Amino acid sequence: MDPAMPSQELIRSLTDEHVLRALMQHRRLTRAELATEIGISKPTAGESVRRLAERGLVTDTGERTPGGRGRGRVGSYYALAPDVGVALAVVIAPEGVVAERLDIYGNTVAHAVRPIDRPTRPSQAAEALQAAAGEVLAACGQPVRLAVVSAADPVDRATGRLVQLPDSPFLVGDLDPVAILAPHVAGTVVVDNDVNWAARAESGTGDDFCYLFLGEGLGCAIVSDGEVRRGHTGLVGEIAHLLTAGPGGRAIPFIEVFTELSLRRPDSTAINVERLLTSDAGTRAAVGEAVGGVVAAVIALADPQEIVVGGAWGPALVDDIRAQTARMPRSVPVRAADLTGEPVLSGVRAEALSRLRSVITANS
Protein backbone atom coordinates (compact mmCIF):
# COMPACT_ATOMS: atom_id res chain seq x y z
CA MET A 1 0.00 0.00 0.00
CA ASP A 2 1.31 3.43 -0.93
CA PRO A 3 1.99 5.68 2.05
CA ALA A 4 -0.65 8.34 2.59
CA MET A 5 0.10 11.64 0.92
CA PRO A 6 0.56 14.58 3.31
CA SER A 7 -2.46 16.84 3.50
CA GLN A 8 -2.43 20.30 1.96
CA GLU A 9 -2.83 21.74 5.44
CA LEU A 10 0.33 19.98 6.61
CA ILE A 11 2.26 21.13 3.54
CA ARG A 12 1.17 24.72 4.09
CA SER A 13 2.12 24.54 7.77
CA LEU A 14 5.60 23.21 6.97
CA THR A 15 6.10 25.85 4.30
CA ASP A 16 5.10 28.60 6.72
CA GLU A 17 7.55 27.27 9.29
CA HIS A 18 10.36 27.27 6.72
CA VAL A 19 9.52 30.85 5.75
CA LEU A 20 9.60 31.98 9.38
CA ARG A 21 12.91 30.27 10.07
CA ALA A 22 14.43 31.76 6.91
CA LEU A 23 13.40 35.21 8.08
CA MET A 24 14.80 34.52 11.55
CA GLN A 25 18.13 33.76 9.94
CA HIS A 26 18.27 36.43 7.25
CA ARG A 27 16.05 39.13 8.85
CA ARG A 28 14.53 40.28 5.54
CA LEU A 29 13.90 38.55 2.21
CA THR A 30 11.82 39.05 -0.89
CA ARG A 31 9.38 36.38 -2.02
CA ALA A 32 11.81 35.40 -4.77
CA GLU A 33 14.65 35.10 -2.26
CA LEU A 34 12.44 33.04 0.05
CA ALA A 35 11.61 30.69 -2.82
CA THR A 36 15.31 30.20 -3.58
CA GLU A 37 16.30 29.84 0.08
CA ILE A 38 13.66 27.23 0.88
CA GLY A 39 13.46 25.51 -2.48
CA ILE A 40 9.83 26.26 -3.32
CA SER A 41 8.09 28.11 -6.14
CA LYS A 42 7.59 31.87 -6.05
CA PRO A 43 3.77 31.55 -5.95
CA THR A 44 4.07 29.13 -3.00
CA ALA A 45 6.37 31.58 -1.19
CA GLY A 46 3.93 34.41 -1.91
CA GLU A 47 0.97 32.46 -0.52
CA SER A 48 2.93 31.63 2.63
CA VAL A 49 3.87 35.26 3.14
CA ARG A 50 0.22 36.26 2.73
CA ARG A 51 -0.95 33.71 5.33
CA LEU A 52 1.72 34.73 7.81
CA ALA A 53 0.96 38.40 7.32
CA GLU A 54 -2.72 37.74 8.06
CA ARG A 55 -1.66 36.10 11.34
CA GLY A 56 0.47 39.09 12.28
CA LEU A 57 3.76 37.19 12.08
CA VAL A 58 5.25 38.71 8.92
CA THR A 59 5.14 42.26 7.61
CA ASP A 60 6.12 44.21 4.52
CA THR A 61 9.12 46.35 5.52
CA GLY A 62 8.37 49.00 2.90
CA GLU A 63 11.77 48.41 1.33
CA ARG A 64 11.95 47.52 -2.37
CA THR A 65 14.54 45.98 -4.64
CA PRO A 66 15.82 48.09 -7.52
CA GLY A 67 13.83 47.19 -10.63
CA GLY A 68 13.51 48.18 -14.26
CA ARG A 69 16.13 48.53 -16.97
CA GLY A 70 16.72 44.80 -17.19
CA ARG A 71 16.73 44.20 -13.47
CA GLY A 72 13.32 42.53 -13.41
CA ARG A 73 10.28 43.41 -11.41
CA VAL A 74 10.52 45.39 -8.19
CA GLY A 75 10.41 43.06 -5.18
CA SER A 76 9.16 43.78 -1.69
CA TYR A 77 11.20 42.87 1.35
CA TYR A 78 9.43 40.99 4.13
CA ALA A 79 10.48 40.51 7.74
CA LEU A 80 9.10 39.16 10.97
CA ALA A 81 6.57 41.46 12.59
CA PRO A 82 8.21 43.77 15.17
CA ASP A 83 5.83 42.58 17.89
CA VAL A 84 6.31 38.86 17.27
CA GLY A 85 7.51 38.32 20.84
CA VAL A 86 10.57 38.16 23.08
CA ALA A 87 12.10 35.80 25.65
CA LEU A 88 13.43 36.40 29.15
CA ALA A 89 16.79 34.89 30.14
CA VAL A 90 17.77 34.91 33.84
CA VAL A 91 20.78 33.76 35.86
CA ILE A 92 20.56 33.61 39.67
CA ALA A 93 24.11 33.34 41.01
CA PRO A 94 25.98 34.13 44.24
CA GLU A 95 27.05 37.47 42.76
CA GLY A 96 23.50 38.49 41.96
CA VAL A 97 20.70 38.20 39.44
CA VAL A 98 21.23 38.89 35.72
CA ALA A 99 18.17 39.30 33.50
CA GLU A 100 18.07 39.85 29.75
CA ARG A 101 15.35 40.38 27.18
CA LEU A 102 16.12 38.60 23.90
CA ASP A 103 14.50 39.28 20.55
CA ILE A 104 13.75 36.66 17.91
CA TYR A 105 17.19 37.18 16.31
CA GLY A 106 19.04 36.45 19.55
CA ASN A 107 19.92 40.07 20.30
CA THR A 108 20.02 41.20 23.92
CA VAL A 109 17.78 44.28 23.81
CA ALA A 110 17.71 44.90 27.58
CA HIS A 111 20.04 43.87 30.41
CA ALA A 112 19.78 44.31 34.16
CA VAL A 113 21.82 43.23 37.17
CA ARG A 114 20.82 43.15 40.85
CA PRO A 115 23.46 42.23 43.47
CA ILE A 116 22.79 39.76 46.28
CA ASP A 117 24.45 39.71 49.70
CA ARG A 118 26.23 36.69 51.15
CA PRO A 119 24.97 34.51 52.68
CA THR A 120 22.02 34.75 50.36
CA ARG A 121 18.52 34.93 51.82
CA PRO A 122 15.58 33.63 49.78
CA SER A 123 13.64 36.86 50.32
CA GLN A 124 16.49 39.00 49.00
CA ALA A 125 17.00 36.71 46.02
CA ALA A 126 13.27 36.95 45.24
CA GLU A 127 13.36 40.75 45.42
CA ALA A 128 16.42 40.90 43.18
CA LEU A 129 14.79 38.55 40.65
CA GLN A 130 11.59 40.59 40.61
CA ALA A 131 13.47 43.87 40.19
CA ALA A 132 15.81 42.65 37.43
CA ALA A 133 12.97 41.07 35.44
CA GLY A 134 10.81 44.15 35.87
CA GLU A 135 13.57 46.42 34.57
CA VAL A 136 14.27 44.47 31.36
CA LEU A 137 10.56 43.98 30.61
CA ALA A 138 9.51 47.57 31.26
CA ALA A 139 7.94 49.19 28.18
CA CYS A 140 8.54 45.97 26.26
CA GLY A 141 5.67 46.53 23.85
CA GLN A 142 5.35 42.90 22.77
CA PRO A 143 4.48 39.58 24.34
CA VAL A 144 7.04 37.87 26.57
CA ARG A 145 6.62 34.35 25.24
CA LEU A 146 8.68 32.46 27.84
CA ALA A 147 11.45 32.62 30.41
CA VAL A 148 14.51 30.43 30.91
CA VAL A 149 16.17 30.56 34.33
CA SER A 150 19.45 29.28 35.76
CA ALA A 151 20.01 28.97 39.51
CA ALA A 152 23.16 28.13 41.46
CA ASP A 153 21.23 25.57 43.49
CA PRO A 154 19.60 22.21 42.83
CA VAL A 155 16.23 22.52 41.09
CA ASP A 156 13.17 20.35 41.60
CA ARG A 157 12.36 18.97 38.16
CA ALA A 158 8.59 18.91 38.69
CA THR A 159 8.05 22.37 40.18
CA GLY A 160 11.06 24.49 39.22
CA ARG A 161 11.57 25.41 42.88
CA LEU A 162 15.08 25.50 44.25
CA VAL A 163 16.08 22.72 46.64
CA GLN A 164 18.18 23.30 49.75
CA LEU A 165 20.57 20.38 50.26
CA PRO A 166 23.00 19.99 53.19
CA ASP A 167 26.21 21.97 52.71
CA SER A 168 24.84 23.90 49.74
CA PRO A 169 26.84 27.17 49.73
CA PHE A 170 24.09 29.42 48.36
CA LEU A 171 21.12 29.63 50.68
CA VAL A 172 18.23 30.26 48.28
CA GLY A 173 16.63 26.84 48.64
CA ASP A 174 13.05 28.03 49.05
CA LEU A 175 13.06 30.35 46.05
CA ASP A 176 10.29 29.75 43.49
CA PRO A 177 11.33 31.44 40.20
CA VAL A 178 8.25 30.09 38.37
CA ALA A 179 5.83 31.82 40.75
CA ILE A 180 7.80 35.07 40.64
CA LEU A 181 8.10 35.26 36.85
CA ALA A 182 4.77 33.74 35.78
CA PRO A 183 2.90 37.08 35.98
CA HIS A 184 5.40 38.58 33.52
CA VAL A 185 5.39 35.73 30.99
CA ALA A 186 2.67 34.51 28.63
CA GLY A 187 4.11 31.00 28.34
CA THR A 188 6.32 28.62 30.28
CA VAL A 189 9.06 29.38 32.81
CA VAL A 190 11.87 26.80 32.49
CA VAL A 191 14.24 26.47 35.47
CA ASP A 192 17.39 24.36 35.79
CA ASN A 193 20.64 24.57 37.73
CA ASP A 194 23.69 26.44 36.52
CA VAL A 195 25.87 23.39 35.90
CA ASN A 196 23.35 21.87 33.51
CA TRP A 197 23.15 25.14 31.54
CA ALA A 198 26.95 25.36 31.35
CA ALA A 199 27.04 21.78 30.07
CA ARG A 200 24.43 22.58 27.42
CA ALA A 201 26.58 25.48 26.22
CA GLU A 202 29.55 23.10 25.98
CA SER A 203 27.61 20.25 24.37
CA GLY A 204 28.47 21.20 20.80
CA THR A 205 31.71 19.27 21.29
CA GLY A 206 30.20 15.83 21.81
CA ASP A 207 27.18 13.75 22.71
CA ASP A 208 28.52 11.86 25.75
CA PHE A 209 30.55 13.64 28.40
CA CYS A 210 30.62 14.60 32.04
CA TYR A 211 30.88 18.29 32.89
CA LEU A 212 32.50 18.95 36.27
CA PHE A 213 31.79 22.42 37.63
CA LEU A 214 34.43 23.19 40.25
CA GLY A 215 34.08 26.65 41.76
CA GLU A 216 32.72 28.03 45.02
CA GLY A 217 30.21 25.21 44.74
CA LEU A 218 30.61 21.69 43.38
CA GLY A 219 28.45 20.26 40.62
CA CYS A 220 28.34 17.80 37.77
CA ALA A 221 26.24 17.40 34.64
CA ILE A 222 25.92 14.15 32.73
CA VAL A 223 25.37 14.57 28.99
CA SER A 224 24.33 11.32 27.29
CA ASP A 225 23.26 11.04 23.65
CA GLY A 226 23.36 14.83 23.51
CA GLU A 227 20.89 15.31 26.38
CA VAL A 228 21.53 16.51 29.92
CA ARG A 229 20.27 13.80 32.26
CA ARG A 230 18.34 15.22 35.19
CA GLY A 231 16.99 12.18 37.01
CA HIS A 232 13.65 11.56 38.70
CA THR A 233 13.66 14.75 40.79
CA GLY A 234 16.27 16.73 38.86
CA LEU A 235 19.16 16.13 41.25
CA VAL A 236 21.56 14.19 39.01
CA GLY A 237 25.12 15.42 39.50
CA GLU A 238 24.95 16.58 43.13
CA ILE A 239 28.46 15.36 43.93
CA ALA A 240 29.24 17.26 47.14
CA HIS A 241 28.57 14.24 49.36
CA LEU A 242 30.06 11.60 47.09
CA LEU A 243 32.74 9.63 48.99
CA THR A 244 36.25 10.17 47.70
CA ALA A 245 39.87 10.12 48.87
CA GLY A 246 40.63 12.79 51.45
CA PRO A 247 43.96 13.83 52.98
CA GLY A 248 45.84 10.78 54.18
CA GLY A 249 43.79 8.50 51.92
CA ARG A 250 40.72 8.46 54.18
CA ALA A 251 37.34 8.09 52.48
CA ILE A 252 35.32 11.25 53.20
CA PRO A 253 32.57 13.24 51.43
CA PHE A 254 33.96 15.38 48.60
CA ILE A 255 32.87 18.64 50.23
CA GLU A 256 34.71 17.72 53.45
CA VAL A 257 38.03 17.59 51.58
CA PHE A 258 37.99 21.38 51.44
CA THR A 259 37.31 21.61 55.17
CA GLU A 260 40.28 19.34 55.88
CA LEU A 261 42.50 21.49 53.65
CA SER A 262 41.23 24.81 55.11
CA LEU A 263 39.84 25.86 51.73
CA ARG A 264 36.35 26.93 52.79
CA ARG A 265 35.20 30.50 53.23
CA PRO A 266 34.54 31.55 56.85
CA ASP A 267 31.08 30.59 58.14
CA SER A 268 30.21 29.03 54.79
CA THR A 269 30.49 25.80 52.83
CA ALA A 270 31.59 27.84 49.79
CA ILE A 271 35.10 27.01 48.59
CA ASN A 272 37.68 29.77 48.84
CA VAL A 273 38.73 29.89 45.19
CA GLU A 274 41.50 32.46 45.66
CA ARG A 275 43.15 30.43 48.42
CA LEU A 276 42.89 27.20 46.41
CA LEU A 277 44.45 28.74 43.30
CA THR A 278 47.40 30.07 45.30
CA SER A 279 47.87 26.92 47.37
CA ASP A 280 51.04 24.83 47.38
CA ALA A 281 51.68 21.81 45.16
CA GLY A 282 50.77 19.36 47.92
CA THR A 283 47.37 20.92 48.49
CA ARG A 284 46.64 21.01 44.79
CA ALA A 285 47.66 17.36 44.46
CA ALA A 286 45.32 16.44 47.34
CA VAL A 287 42.45 18.26 45.65
CA GLY A 288 43.32 16.58 42.35
CA GLU A 289 43.22 13.18 44.07
CA ALA A 290 39.80 13.96 45.52
CA VAL A 291 38.46 15.06 42.14
CA GLY A 292 39.95 11.90 40.66
CA GLY A 293 37.83 9.82 43.02
CA VAL A 294 34.73 11.68 41.87
CA VAL A 295 35.71 11.12 38.23
CA ALA A 296 36.18 7.39 38.88
CA ALA A 297 32.63 7.16 40.22
CA VAL A 298 31.23 9.09 37.26
CA ILE A 299 33.06 6.89 34.75
CA ALA A 300 31.77 3.75 36.44
CA LEU A 301 28.16 4.93 36.42
CA ALA A 302 27.85 7.09 33.29
CA ASP A 303 30.55 5.80 30.88
CA PRO A 304 31.31 9.23 29.34
CA GLN A 305 33.47 9.77 26.28
CA GLU A 306 35.39 12.52 28.07
CA ILE A 307 35.48 14.62 31.24
CA VAL A 308 35.13 18.38 30.75
CA VAL A 309 36.30 20.52 33.67
CA GLY A 310 34.84 23.99 34.18
CA GLY A 311 34.22 26.43 37.01
CA ALA A 312 36.40 29.03 38.70
CA TRP A 313 39.24 26.70 39.72
CA GLY A 314 38.65 23.42 37.88
CA PRO A 315 40.51 24.24 34.63
CA ALA A 316 43.57 25.41 36.60
CA LEU A 317 43.88 21.95 38.17
CA VAL A 318 43.35 19.92 35.00
CA ASP A 319 46.93 18.57 35.07
CA ASP A 320 46.53 17.44 38.69
CA ILE A 321 43.23 15.78 37.83
CA ARG A 322 44.74 14.08 34.77
CA ALA A 323 47.58 12.74 36.90
CA GLN A 324 45.02 10.95 39.07
CA THR A 325 42.72 9.72 36.31
CA ALA A 326 45.62 8.35 34.23
CA ARG A 327 46.14 5.65 36.87
CA MET A 328 42.53 4.46 36.80
CA PRO A 329 41.57 1.11 35.26
CA ARG A 330 38.97 2.92 33.13
CA SER A 331 40.49 6.19 32.07
CA VAL A 332 38.92 8.74 29.71
CA PRO A 333 40.32 12.02 28.35
CA VAL A 334 40.12 15.01 30.69
CA ARG A 335 40.14 18.55 29.32
CA ALA A 336 39.33 22.08 30.39
CA ALA A 337 36.01 23.56 29.24
CA ASP A 338 36.10 25.51 25.98
CA LEU A 339 33.69 28.17 27.25
CA THR A 340 35.23 30.07 30.14
CA GLY A 341 33.62 33.54 29.93
CA GLU A 342 29.92 33.17 30.70
CA PRO A 343 29.07 29.51 30.02
CA VAL A 344 25.92 29.53 32.15
CA LEU A 345 24.47 32.67 30.56
CA SER A 346 25.45 31.37 27.12
CA GLY A 347 23.50 28.17 27.75
CA VAL A 348 20.46 30.06 29.04
CA ARG A 349 20.47 32.45 26.09
CA ALA A 350 20.71 29.62 23.57
CA GLU A 351 17.81 27.74 25.14
CA ALA A 352 15.65 30.87 25.40
CA LEU A 353 16.23 31.69 21.72
CA SER A 354 15.54 28.11 20.60
CA ARG A 355 12.31 27.96 22.58
CA LEU A 356 11.21 31.41 21.41
CA ARG A 357 11.66 30.43 17.77
CA SER A 358 9.81 27.18 18.30
CA VAL A 359 6.88 29.03 19.90
CA ILE A 360 6.70 31.48 16.99
CA THR A 361 6.79 28.75 14.34
CA ALA A 362 4.21 26.72 16.25
CA ASN A 363 1.84 29.69 15.95
CA SER A 364 2.17 29.66 12.17
Image: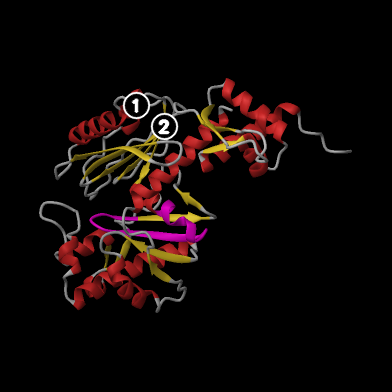
Q: Quadrant of the N terminus?
A: top right
Region rendered in magenta: 199-219
Q: Residue at x 34, y 23 (%)?
A: 183
Its colouring scheme is secondary structure
Query: The residue tagged with tag 2: helix, strand or loop?
Result: strand
How many callouts does the rendering have? 2
Q: Quadrant of residue 10?
A: top right
> Horizontal and vertical percent for residue 263?
16, 63
As measured in the structure, the alpha-carbon distance from the residue carrying label 2 to the one carrying label 1 is 9 Å
In magenta segment, residue 208: yes
Marks 2 and 1: CB-CB under 8 Å?
A: yes
> Horizontal and vertical percent for residue 62?
51, 28
Query: The residue tagged with tag 1: helix, strand or loop?
Result: loop
Left or right side of 32 for 155: left
Q: Nearer the viewer, residue 242 or 101?
A: 101
In magenta segment, residue 308: no
Q: Residue at x 80, y 34 (%)?
A: 5
